[in-house]
Structures are given as C-alpha cells and as structure tokens.
Image (tube, rainbow, N blue to C red):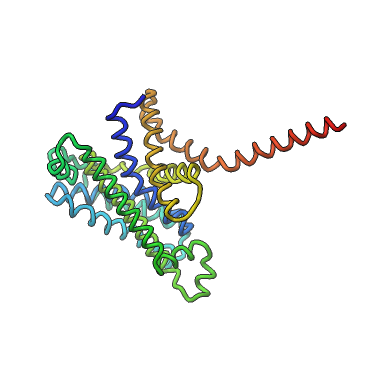
C-alpha cells in the first residue's frame, strides 16, 4: 500500500510535526490553556530559520527560531496575565500581529525559496551519505531530544509548579506560587517548540511560506488526541510518547488520503473531522455501552416476563 519513500516521508513529517503536538500538550493539557498563537508561531519559526539559512547560518536558525517563538508566547502570556485578556483572545491577537512580523522577517515577501541553500539536512547528508535516511535521523533526533528535555523539565520544581497551575491555579496562588510566572514560562516553552517545528520544516522542504502555519492548531490537536485515544492517559512519559506517536499516525492517515487521490485542498477538512471524531470517541463509546446495557436489560426483562 505504501512505498518506502512514502513511509519515510510520513515518518519524517510525523517527527517534525510532533513538536507542535508536544507544544499543545504543554499548553492545552498541562496548563489547561487554549493557546491560539500556534499558527503564527509556527510560521515565525519557518521565517526565522529560512532567513538564517539563506544568510549561511542554518544551525543558528534553530535556536533563533525558538527565541522568536518564546517571545511570541511571552506576548500572549502578558496579554493574558497582565492585561486580563481571555486566553483565546490573547492568542488570536498575537497570532494576528505575527502575520506582519513574519512578513517583515521574510523581507516583506510571501515566501523564501531555499533550493540551493545549505541546511541542517544538507550537513547530515554530507556526513551520513546520500543513501542513508538522513532526513529521518535528523527529525527523529531533534524530536526525541526535545521530548526528553520537556519531561525532565516538568519533573523539576518549576515544572511541577506549572503542572499544578494547570490543575488548580487557586490552590497554587494560596501556596505563594506566582501563577503569572508559571503561565508565562509555560507559554514561552510551548511556542518555542512550535517555532522549532516550523524551523525544521522550512529547512526540510527548502522553502518558507507565509501560509505554512495555517491550521497548525488543528493538526497539532489531531496528533495529540489520536495519541491519547490510542495510548490512554498514563504518566508524563506515556503522554509525551503518545503525542509523538499520534503525530506519526496522523501523517500516515494523510498519506493514505493522498494515495486515495483525495484533493490536497480537502486535507484541512480531514484534519477537522479527525479531531472531532477523536474528541467525541469517549462519549460515543460510553453511549454505545449504555445502549448495549439497556438492550441487555430489556431482553432479560422480556425473558422473565
């Protein structure tokens, strides 16, 4: 059904987009904040990484993209914590402003071509050889390192404070923990991971476009929820691995849709349907179980009668 090239491509993109899934895991699951900055932060990472790579600094483009993403997260957190803007609106405001910022980073051009640009993947190809799965190795290495660092960070005192903030902010305030600080750190880290994902993708496909981040929230949520639905909600390690696995599975679903000649314009709709079904799955399962129990009870009542 799948060729080797299709499998490799799905795995590569799955690992790259897994960074977005982990970012949403941090903001949406841990902090309990619906962060809408994701789309703009992803494009920001693409723009910064592409611009740095074109200037001859592909490796520097990755940390610069993360810093830019953290700055975007800081603005969202500032609007939310200091100016009392609701979290969803704060993300939308930042995301709207980032459109102009992203254009400015790309020299007020809607795209940055990188056909002959030296990238981190070019370096891996020179090091490992053209026949090696160098793209997959680079994408997997970056994602695994970020995943391990995220889990280790959430086990620290600050990480535990961020987790507690998402669980019960009132109790955290009563414990003299500054929730403004924990929310700010959490959103900065989440958007830094989102921007890193965009940075790697830009160098992977050797181009950056102003619309690359459109719908990234839906894609990230689809990956996160697919992983949670299939692997359950265990400890932090389980949740992090589930986010990565969900991203890979999502890319295989998209690859399967493309193999079935589904128009590329319909992929966003497919993503939305996947998210809706994944979120509704527990409720649908509970409803089906209730109907089975009721049918069984009615059958027993009829037999006793």
Residue 152 occupies quadrant: bottom left
Name the residue nearer the viewer: 15 or 272.
Answer: 15
Q: Residue at x 33, y 35 (%)?
A: 10
Tell me the quadrant of the picture where the N terminus can be found.
top left
Q: Position of residue 112 (x, y in %)?
A: 20, 42
Q: Position of residue 78 (x, y in %)?
A: 39, 65
Q: Position of residue 233 (x, y in %)?
A: 50, 50
Residue 263 occupies quadrant: top left
Tell me the quadrant of the picture where the C terminus can be found.
top right
Name the residue nearer the viewer: 293 or 257.
Answer: 293
Q: Residue at x 66, y 38 (%)?
A: 289
Residue 30 to residue 214: above or below: below
Name the residue nearer the viewer: 221 or 133.
Answer: 133
Q: Position of residue 202 (x, y in %)?
A: 24, 43
Residue 24 to residue 113: above or below: below
Q: Residue at x 46, y 61 (%)?
A: 85
Q: Horizontal placement of 256 versus 274: left or right? A: left
């Amino acid at each position: 059904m799948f060729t080797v090239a299709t499998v490799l491509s799905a795995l590569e993109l799955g690992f790259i987009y897994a960074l977005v899934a982990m970012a949403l895991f941090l903001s949406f699951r841990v902090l309990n904040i619906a962060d809408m900055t994701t789309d703009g932060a992803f494009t920001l990472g693409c723009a910064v990484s592409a611009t740095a790579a074109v200037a001859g600094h592909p490796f520097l483009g990755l940390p610069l993209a993360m810093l830019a993403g953290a700055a975007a997260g800081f603005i969202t957190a500032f609007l939310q914590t200091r100016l009392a803007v609701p979290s969803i609106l704060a993300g939308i405001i930042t995301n709207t402003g980032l459109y102009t910022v992203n254009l400015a980073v790309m020299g007020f051009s809607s795209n940055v071509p990188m056909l002959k640009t030296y990238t981190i993947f070019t370096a891996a190809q020179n090091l490992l050889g053209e026949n090696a799965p160098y793209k997959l190795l680079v994408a997997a290495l970056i994602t695994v390192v970020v995943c391990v660092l995220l889990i280790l960070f959430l086990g620290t005192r600050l990480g535990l404070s961020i987790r507690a903030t998402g669980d019960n902010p009132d109790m955290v305030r009563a414990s003299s923990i500054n929730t403004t600080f924990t929310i700010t750190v959490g959103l900065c880290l989440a958007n830094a991971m989102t921007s890193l994902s965009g940075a790697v993708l830009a160098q992977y496909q050797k181009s950056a476009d102003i619309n690359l981040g459109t719908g990234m929230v839906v894609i990230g949520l689809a990956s996160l929820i697919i992983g949670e639905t299939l692997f359950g909600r265990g400890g932090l390690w389980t949740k992090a691995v589930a986010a990565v696995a969900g991203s890979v599975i999502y890319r295989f679903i998209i690859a399967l849709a493309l193999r079935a000649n589904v128009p590329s314009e319909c992929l966003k709709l497919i993503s939305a349907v996947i998210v809706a079904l994944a979120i509704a799955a527990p409720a649908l399962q509970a409803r089906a179980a209730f109907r089975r129990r009721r049918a069984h009870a009615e059958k027993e009542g009829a037999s006793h009668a």
